[in-house]
Image (spheres, helix red, strand yellow):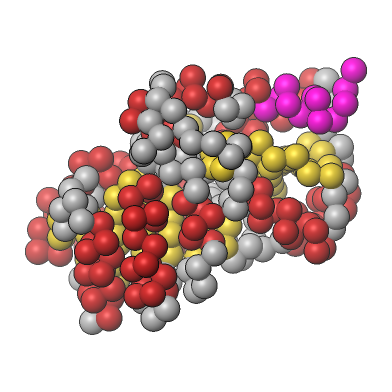
């Protein structure tokens, strides 16, 4: 299931291309954007099906209301903009119009996390998963590579109800074999087996965790690596089994440590398998401007920094 090539691709391009493929077979798919279609790559759908694409302008709340109306009339709606604007600016419309009515709207937000880079704190969505997972009747999904992005978008197009799908600005290394990988919305995925430690991640930090696990292996620490693309509804069986085995859990995410995957894991294990847990993510702070890789390093999200933090957590001398 894992790829052997690790090819680097743009998840935004894959999103746009997948929309075009889906639009060819489903005439009820419509796409909305908030004047960022070249950045989100919904421009590909706009070019292929101009009569089913709507640029709502820099009016994200209006876009969500329009998406709700189209969904009410039976359309499968994909609405896209940057993650910061799709969530914080539109909470009222998402909660009270889309989710309360269980409408078939897929909010596919790009530029999630600290890796928006030089645009800085105003554009870096570090709280979006926290916002979305607190709203009833919405699925929250964070794919880890372009193979998974494509599978998740296909799943979204064929599954009724509200969804929030978060993809980053950065290009991603291929983790999953496109010929073999099948997205399973009902379970987490174990990437690596170990006995000493459980590391949980998703999104663009999954690759960093996999590389850190190799470094940990070299010093005798064997890790379970668990990928949790579906943050809500959260399926805990694989995590529970792993935590009961290792007793120590590290969560790595490109998000605030408050309310995201780390909080989900803490809530789950507190109920099913109490464990010693260490969360690696953005602490209670706003982001800052900088080159993407520098920011990942500064906030401890690179494979090297994850390795160093885990060594301290494990109290390895």
Residue placed most toward the observer, 53 or 313: 313
Point 75% across, 39% down: residue: 278
The answer to whether residue 108 is visible is no
Which image quadrant for residue 175?
A: top right
Point 41% across, 70% down: residue: 95
Residue 156 in the image, given as x and y percentages of width and height: 41, 64
Q: Specify whether residue 307 is painted magenta.
A: yes
Q: Specify whether residue 93 is painted magenta.
A: no
Residue placed most toward the observer, 14 or 165: 165
Which of the image's four quarters has the N terminus? top right
Point 81% across, 30% down: residue: 313
Residue 18 in the image, given as x and y percentages of width and height: 31, 53
Above/below status of 233 relative to 84: below
Residue placed most toward the observer, 242 or 23: 242
The answer to whether residue 148 is visible is yes
Q: Which residues are magenta?
A: 306-317
Direction from residue 315 to residue 280 in the image, left or right? left
Which image quadrant for residue 225?
A: top right
Residue 163 in the image, given as x and y percentages of width and height: 43, 64
Residue 139 in the image, given as x and y percentages of width and height: 50, 65
Above/below status of 271 relative to 18: below
Residue placed most toward the observer, 106 or 148: 106
Residue at the extreme left of the image, as rendered: 51
Which of the image's four quarters has the C terminus? top right
């Amino acid at each position: 299931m894992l790829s052997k090539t690790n090819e680097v691709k743009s998840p935004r391009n894959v999103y746009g291309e997948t929309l075009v493929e889906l639009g060819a077979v489903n005439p009820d798919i419509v796409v909305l954007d908030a004047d960022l279609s070249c950045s989100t790559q919904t421009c590909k759908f706009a070019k292929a099906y101009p009569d089913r694409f709507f640029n709502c302008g820099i009016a994200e709340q209006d876009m969500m209301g329009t998406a709700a109306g189209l969904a009410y009339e039976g359309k499968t709606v994909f609405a896209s903009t940057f993650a910061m604007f799709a969530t914080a600016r539109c909470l009222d419309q998402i909660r009270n119009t889309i989710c309360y009515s269980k409408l078939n709207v897929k909010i596919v937000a790009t530029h999630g996390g600290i890796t928006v880079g030089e645009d800085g704190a105003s554009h870096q969505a570090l709280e979006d998963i926290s916002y979305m997972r607190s709203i009833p009747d919405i699925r929250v999904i964070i794919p880890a590579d372009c193979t998974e992005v494509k599978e998740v978008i296909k799943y979204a197009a064929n599954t009724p109800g509200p969804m929030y799908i978060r993809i980053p600005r950065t290009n991603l290394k291929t983790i999953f074999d496109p010929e073999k990988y099948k997205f399973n919305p009902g379970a987490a995925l174990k990437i690596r087996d170990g006995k000493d430690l459980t590391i949980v991640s998703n999104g663009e930090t999954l690759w960093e965790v996999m590389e850190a696990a190799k470094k940990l292996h070299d010093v005798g620490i064997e890790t379970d690596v668990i990928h949790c693309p579906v943050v809500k509804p959260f399926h805990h069986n694989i995590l529970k089994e792993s935590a009961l085995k290792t007793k120590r859990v590290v969560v790595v995410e490109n998000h605030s440590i408050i309310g995201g995957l780390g909080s989900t894991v803490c809530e789950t294990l507190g109920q099913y398998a109490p464990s010693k847990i260490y969360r690696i993510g953005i602490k209670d702070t706003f982001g800052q401007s900088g080159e993407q890789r520098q920011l990942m390093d500064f906030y401890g999200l690179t494979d090297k920094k994850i390795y160093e933090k885990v060594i301290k957590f494990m109290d390895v001398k």
